Amino acid sequence: MSSTVVVGQISRDLVLSVDALPGARETARVLRRREVLGGKGANIAVALAQLGLPVSLLGVVGDDHVAATLLNRARRDGVDVEPVVRREGATTGLTVDVPDAHGDWHYLEHLPPEVQLTEDDVASAAPTLRAARCAVIQLRQPTAAALAAATLVRETGGLVVLDGAPPEGEHRDALLAAADVLRTGTRQACRLTGTDASDLDADLDADLALGAAHALMDRHGIALVALGVPGADAFAWATGSRVVPHLATRVVDTTGAADALCAALTSVLCRGGDAEEAVDLAVAAAAATVEHPGGRPNLTPRRLRRFLAAVG
């Protein structure tokens, strides 16, 4: 086994930075415009490549000129796109990200059903998945396809990282049981454990997050759980736990923080590193990503060293 695979969305990202969103019948001036390779799957794959891992991407694009441009960009980023499906007659997904002056993001998405991964797509990529030392499976895909991918990776002893929370349904428990690592939000984790999430806005805190994390570990055999809470990230594993406050002091756009965090966790664990090392790099990668607009990572050694020094 010699590779990492990311299973997830690929889209064209249009990033429009503004001071504030306009109201009805108002206009906001765009301060900066960027068009980049995006989608959570592609962002995680690019981050893994920047962190030095050989990585393949499995997702679906259309047969339009946008797809060709995005795949060429991914190749230049060091990502193997041979497993990517080019769906005949489909339109490649589009995400419009509008970060404001406070670092809050606002999304518009056009992700047609045709660019969702299918079980047949996964079967076609079976050799790549079986050869993977580790795989990140982004859960904004149909759960049947996600489970099929996780099963193929587990067949040969690969590490499975789930990014997101599987929705209720017949595949949810099987997906969680296939996971070695789960990264999601505390609210989503509480729903997975049956906690009443109706009043969580005022109650999201580290204790709640760690309680949900340990419940998921006990119930499904997950080795490490990473959860976001306001102002921090919480991590739990068999022999320890940590809550790390967000490190960035200049937040421009939080869009890609979770993708970078997930990629960094994966890169350390896939190389055989321990949970403490993985947490350090994960929070540093997230901090490095929120200082620029858009979700595309920029995990240079210099930027990571700056935040690793602040982890303490």
Image (tube, helix red, strand yellow):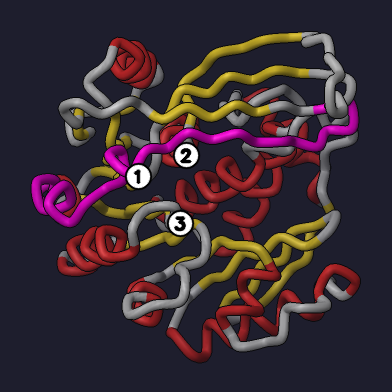
Determine whether label 2 and label 3 are within 8 Å by CB: no
Residue named by callout 1: 6
Inspect the magenta stretch and tell me whether residue 110 lies in it. yes
| Region in magenta | 100-127
Q: Nearer the viewer, mark 2 or mark 3?
A: 2
Inspect the magenta stretch and tell me whether residue 288 lies in it. no
Label 3, secondary structure: give it.
helix
Residue named by callout 3: 269
Amino acid tagged 1: Val
**Label at residue 44:** 2
In three-dimensional space, the C-alpha distance between marks 3 and 1, rounded to whole angstroms, equals 15 Å
Compared with 211, 19 (above or below) is above
What x and y, as percent, mark residue 262? Answer: 54, 50
Label 2, secondary structure: give it.
helix
Q: Is residue 61 left or right of residue 210?
A: left
Which image quadrant is residue 116 in? top left
In three-dimensional space, the C-alpha distance between marks 2 and 3, rounded to whole angstroms, equals 15 Å
Q: Can see residue 160?
A: yes
In three-dimensional space, the C-alpha distance between marks 2 and 1, rounded to whole angstroms, equals 7 Å
